[in-house]
Amino acid sequence: MVQLKSRIEAVLFTTAKALTSKEISEILNEETDTIEEALLELIMDYSARDGALEIDDENGYILQVKEEHMDIVEKLCPVELKPAVLRTLSVIALKEPIRQTQLKDMRGSNAYEHVHELLEKGLISRTRDKNGKSFNLKTTPKFAEYFKLKGDTKTLAKMLDIEQKVTDGP
C-alpha cells in the first residue's frame, strides 16, 4: 500500500487538474476500490502532517497548497490567468507602452478589472501619462520571467513576424 500511495502522490503532483479515482486507477492500472482506499489513507497522511499541502477531494482528487499559504504562492508565481485577462496582457505586451484609455477602447470596460488583476500579480506597471488624465501600461521583468522571454516584446513580435500586423492593425 505504501508504494501505491507514493504512485498516487506522483500522479496528483504531476497533474494540473482534479482526477477521479477511476482516472487514477486507469493511469496506474489498479482496481478503483484499491485506489480509493489508498487515496483515503493518503488524505489522512497529509492531514496528520499539518503541512502546507493537502489533497482536495471536492471535484475529484488534486494535490494543492492549503488556502492559508496561497499568498506565498501568488508572490512567487501568478496563478493561471483567465483567457480574457491573458488577451488583455497580450495587447499590453505587444503595444507597450499603451495608454490605459486606448486599452479600454480595444478590450472594453472589463480591461480596467484586468489591469487591476495584472498589477496585483506584478505582471504590468502603470505610470501617469504626461497630461495626467490616463495611465501608461507596460510589462514588468516579472512578466518576462514568468513567460520565460528574453529581450523585449518588440523583439518577440519581430520573431513571431507580427509586429506589422500589431502596429498597423484595425
Image: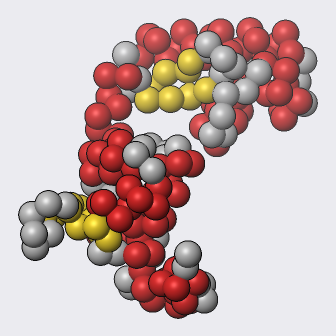
Residue positioned 76% across, 12% down in the render: 36
Q: How far across and how far down the image is residue 149, in percent? A: 45, 75
Say above or below: 41 vs 11: above
Residue 145 is at least partly visible in this image: no
Say above or below: 16 vs 69: below
Which quadrant of the structure image shows residue 5? top right
Which quadrant of the structure image shows residue 95? bottom left
Left or right side of 20 for 141: left
- Residue in front for this viewpoint, 43 or 66: 66
Say above or below: 165 vs 82: below
Left or right side of 31 for 40: left
Say above or below: 93 vs 53: below
> Looking at the image, how many numbered discs can be counted on the residues?
0
Residue 60 is at least partly visible in this image: yes
Left or right side of 8 for 108: left
Residue positioned 86% across, 15% down in the render: 32
Residue positioned 52% across, 57% down in the render: 87
- Residue in front for this viewpoint, 139 or 58: 139
Q: How far across and how far down the image is residue 60, in percent? A: 69, 19
Q: How far across and how far down the image is residue 24, in percent? A: 79, 27
Q: How far across and how far down the image is residue 161, in percent? A: 60, 89
| Quadrant containing the C terminus in the rendered view | bottom right
